[in-house]
Image (cartoon, rainbow, N blue to C red):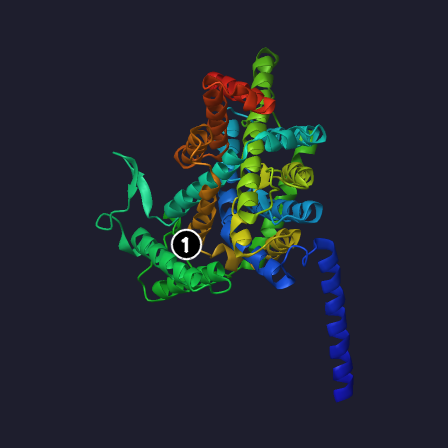
């Protein structure tokens, strides 16, 4: 019997080694100075920092009339397919999921304000993805990426870091809305200490704990910080210090299983409504109230629809490029002349993910800036992105666990990611004002406009105009000049 067990153990070890060799060969792990263990944990960290989209996306898109359960399944599938394609196609550790912000544009502007049905709005997302594919075929997005000077690329990384920090401090309830100064620091004397008060304190404590792990150079410091802060939250909830209030956005930190299987079954039934709805003419109408657009307003609505498509396209292009630039700078993926090898494959994966997501029933799927969390841990290959895809699929089985990860647990992790991305500021040539001033404008515009794409546009416009006014227009790439004209026209007509 013992001999039989030894034989089974040897067979299992041989199979594991064989699988490891396949992963090593496909993802070129040794060549990238990484291993399966590091890539897997990097994927877990990336997933945990972006798992909030599983709760937020259904909430936002349901405002358009879409069934919340169906959107949850669509979010999981779109994120899993997009991340897996990114990993297999480009061999980069970039994760994808339905974009936050553009989903709000889908619900609150396209559907609620402009009056389109959600099914019809999905057509806009689907067509945007097709246009993306055509732009990739013409290498237009790649030309845009390569035309941006190194100083602006570094500035994009820093700007994204500032934006991530701002988002994290908001999610941690430390920075709040303020009537006098737009935003301000939480006032613990004026808030409920059982909800937002303790939430902010746990965030601050989590930042200190995670910082200590990072300073001590503990392996998996960011992941350990998430778990340690989450555990503190569970303890405070058990003793009654933290009191969940779901209606106010303060959910329980303790996983709630309950009738999960029934809820999952209901979600899959609703997914049947969203999946492929855009290809069924009987299931969608032009307007949200169920009416077909009349001939008298069809031209105006058609023009509106074109505007909607290009709004999705425009935001997705520069959010994606900004994320790829920022994370690539931090991960050291760029060549000496600022180019990203296999960029076209990464962009194809992003475009295909958008069209696939629209078919499943969700708004634009895009590359996530939270990918920087996995890169900061050490993720360097597509195996990280594939691991993220697997975790999204697993979230169907363990959704109560993942959905219970509170914002105060992930906020400290994002603060650390922001800190790591800020180090790219050293790559800007501060002795050359022609380079550094546009870089500064780019990086500061991102958090203040709450938009990666607007930050890039501000940087491109200022770079071109400053160099033109100082007699250095010949040093500006022609693509940058074309982009400047397009951006100025966009702001003039918006």
Q: Could you tell me which residue is drawn at 47 percent across and 58 percent down?
A: 222
Secondary structure of the residue carrying tag 1 is: helix
Q: Is residue 257 above or below residue 50?
A: below
Q: Residue at x 60, y 37 (%)?
A: 337
- x, y percentage for residue 368? 55, 44
Q: Can the viewer see residue 259 in this picture?
A: yes
Which residue is the extreme one toward the left? 189
The quarter of the picture where residue 323 lies is top right
Q: Is residue 389 left or right of residue 457?
A: right
Location of the N terminus (image quadrant):
bottom right
Residue 350 at x, y percent in the picture: 64, 39
- Residue at the far top in the pictured view: 296
80 sits left or right of 244 in the view: right
Which residue is nearer to you in this view: 430 or 289? Answer: 430
- Residue furthest to the front: 431
Q: Which residue is mark 1?
A: 412
Nearer the observer, 492 or 301:
492
Residue 117 in view of the camera = no
- Image coordinates of residue 362 in percent, x first then y, are 59, 39
Question: Where residue 49 sits: x, y (%)?
Answer: 50, 52
Tell whether 170 sits left or right of 336. left
Within 10 Å of the Cα at label 1, are there few (<14), some (14-19), or many (20+) other Cα atoms?
many
* Count of numbered badges drawn on the protein: 1
């Amino acid at each position: 019997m013992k001999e039989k067990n030894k034989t089974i153990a040897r067979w299992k070890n041989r199979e594991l080694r064989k699988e490891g060799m396949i992963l090593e060969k496909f993802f070129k792990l040794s060549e990238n100075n990484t291993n399966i263990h590091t890539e897997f944990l990097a994927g877990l960290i990336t997933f945990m920092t972006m798992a909030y989209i599983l709760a937020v996306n259904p909430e936002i898109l349901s405002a358009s009339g879409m069934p919340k359960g169906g959107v949850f399944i669509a979010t999981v599938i779109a994120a899993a397919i997009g991340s897996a394609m990114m990993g297999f196609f480009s061999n980069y550790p970039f994760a994808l999921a339905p974009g936050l912000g553009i989903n709000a544009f889908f619900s609150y502007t396209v559907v609620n304000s402009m009056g389109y049905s959600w099914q019809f709005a999905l057509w806009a997302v689907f067509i945007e993805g097709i246009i993306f594919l055509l732009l990739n075929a013409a290498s237009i997005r790649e030309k845009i990426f390569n035309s941006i000077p190194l100083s602006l690329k570094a500035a994009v990384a820093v700007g994204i870091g500032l934006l991530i920090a701002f988002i994290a401090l908001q999610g941690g309830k430390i920075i709040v809305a303020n009537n006098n100064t737009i935003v301000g620091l939480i006032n613990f004397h004026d808030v409920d200490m059982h909800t937002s008060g303790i939430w902010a304190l746990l965030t601050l404590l989590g930042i200190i704990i995670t910082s200590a792990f990072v300073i001590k150079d503990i392996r998996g410091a960011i992941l350990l910080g998430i778990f340690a802060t989450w555990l503190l939250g569970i303890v405070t909830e058990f003793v009654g210090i933290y009191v969940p209030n779901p209606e106010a956005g303060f959910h329980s930190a303790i996983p709630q299983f309950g009738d999960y299987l029934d809820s999952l079954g209901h979600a899959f039934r609703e997914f049947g409504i969203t999946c492929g709805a855009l290809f069924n003419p009987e299931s969608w109408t032009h307007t949200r109230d169920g009416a077909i657009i009349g001939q008298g307003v069809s031209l105006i609505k058609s023009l509106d629809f074109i505007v909607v498509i290009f709004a999705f396209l425009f935001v997705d292009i520069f959010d994606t490029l900004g994320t790829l630039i920022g994370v690539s700078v931090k991960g050291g993926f760029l060549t000496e002349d600022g180019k990203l090898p296999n960029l076209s494959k990464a962009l194809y994966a992003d475009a295909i993910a958008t069209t696939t997501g629209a078919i499943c029933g969700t708004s634009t799927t895009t590359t996530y800036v939270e990918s920087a969390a996995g890169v900061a841990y050490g993720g360097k290959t597509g195996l990280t992105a594939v691991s993220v895809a697997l975790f999204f699929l697993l979230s169907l089985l363990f959704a109560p666990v993942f959905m219970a990860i509170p914002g105060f647990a992930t906020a400290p992790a994002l603060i650390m990611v922001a800190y790591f991305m800020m180090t790219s500021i050293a790559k800007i040539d501060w002795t050359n004002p022609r380079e550094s001033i546009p870089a500064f404008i780019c990086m500061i515009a991102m958090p203040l406009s709450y938009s990666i794409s607007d930050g890039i546009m501000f940087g491109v416009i200022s770079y071109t105009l400053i160099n033109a006014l100082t007699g250095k227009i010949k040093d500006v790439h022609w693509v940058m000049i074309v982009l400047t004209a397009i951006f100025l026209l966009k702001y003039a007509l918006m």
